[in-house]
Amino acid sequence: MKLERCRICKNKKLEKILDLGEMPLANAFLDKNQLSQKEISYPLRVVWCKSCGLLQIDEIVPPEILFRNYVYVSGTSEALRKHFEGLATEVVTNFKLNSESLVIDIGSNDGTLLKEFKKIGAKVIGVEPALNISKIAQEEGITTVNDFFSENIAKKIIKDNGKADAITATNVIAHTNDLDKLLKGVSHLLKDEGIFVIEVPYLVDLLEKVEFDTIYHEHLSYFALRPIKIFFDEHDFKIIDIKRVKIHGGTIRVFVSKKKSRYNVNENVNQLVSLEIKKGLNEVTAYRKFAERVEKLKEDLVSLLQKLKSENKKVIGYGAAAKGNTLLNYYHIGPELIEFIADLSPMKQNKFTPGTHIPVYNPKQIYEAKPDYMLILAWNFADEIMKQQSRFKEIGGRFIIPVPEVKIV
């Protein structure tokens, strides 16, 4: 389904910034017997709203297709676990949560974040549409509603548990097409003095670090602060604080309350709006330059891999991340240049990447294959990966990091 108007301000003036072509779904990994079958693909185009400044993709894949059976699991990353620990500590400390508090996490995945709130004794409930992932959370002792968050789900939670002191949504707002519907549910569920905390990848980082591979069908919106502020203002919410954090290549953590709450607005909010204006995010030129840099990056990485191939060097990938599949498909990089990809997630191992059909193996395979280079596709966890794979470096292996510039470490 094609987007006809901006999902924030409903304006129809959407300017095309980057066309990544027809793409398979980034997390639609294949079994061996599926390799001969035709894969479903969808257009992947990025457009910019001239009115509110929201960068977004204009093809909407039904969420039931994207999220009912999911392969991304939060708990496999040490960096993400530590990040969630810090988030929970900040919310508990700043908003004085205790054992009587109710915390709801929308898009709760395997419950990694809620485990941190549970440590302080808070009552926790996750809402997670993926059946396979919600089962993992339930088995870990996290009460989880297996559904998409909605007004009706909010009302059911209130009926059984009362209203929430805190609601979190990390990397969920960017996945949501009907944002108005989601916020109506939050408005019902949140106490008048409750806090709503969202995290979204930050547009400033995406543009400056050329993080084009974070663009895929699950990620519908790419947020600067200005469109977020417009959105919350229209729904009787206010942004009371905001901070930049490093996770996922650059993220903003936004603290939101109802307009009638006692909370004051921190000066951080206005400072970040000013930064965005200074960086030209209100003008199309910044986005045009970004698109040009994506093409230069493509040329650099493909040239390097072809050169290594001509020198009979063996290259593998590390991290079968969704972002990696955007990069591999747009750059047309397949098993002729990358022999296989290593990944810690059992859900991805012994499968093949969508579109490019590169096999995914357990990291143990690295030391049997003895590659010369390792392309880190999950570059947002590059430090963690290089630390885990220190043995690879010790035996002479070298790492390739593809963004914000192609770099050999």
Image: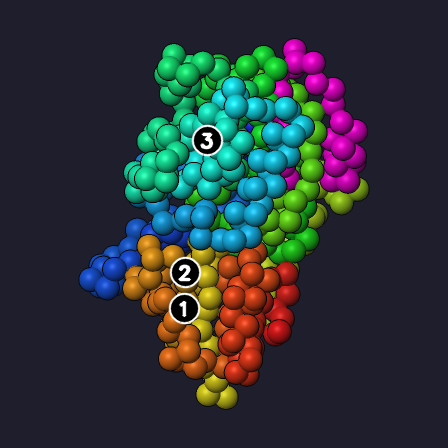
Rendering coords of residue 98 (x, y %): 56, 24
Distance between the alpha carbons at the discs numbered 1 and 2: 6 Å
According to the picture, the residue beneath numbered tag 2 turns out to be: 344
Q: Which residues are magenta?
A: 252-277
* Three-letter residue code for mark 2: Leu
**In the rendered view, would you say 374 is above or below 181?**
below
Within the image, what quadrant is residue 223 found in?
Answer: top right
Within the image, what quadrant is residue 329 found in?
Answer: bottom left
- Answer whether residue 263 is magenta in the image: yes
Left or right side of 275 for 320: left
Is disc 3 placed on a helix, strand or loop?
strand
Q: Nearer the viewer, residue 63 or 117?
A: 117
Q: Nearer the viewer, residue 312 or 297?
A: 312
User: Are the residues tagged 1 and 2 within 8 Å (C-beta)?
Assistant: yes
Distance between the alpha carbons at the discs numbered 1 and 3: 31 Å
The tag earlier along the polypeptide, 2 or 3, is 3
The tag earlier along the polypeptide, 1 or 3, is 3
* Three-letter residue code for mark 3: Ile
For disc 1, the neighbor class at 10 Å (few under 14, some 14 to 19, many from 20) is some
- Answer whether residue 110 is magenta in the image: no
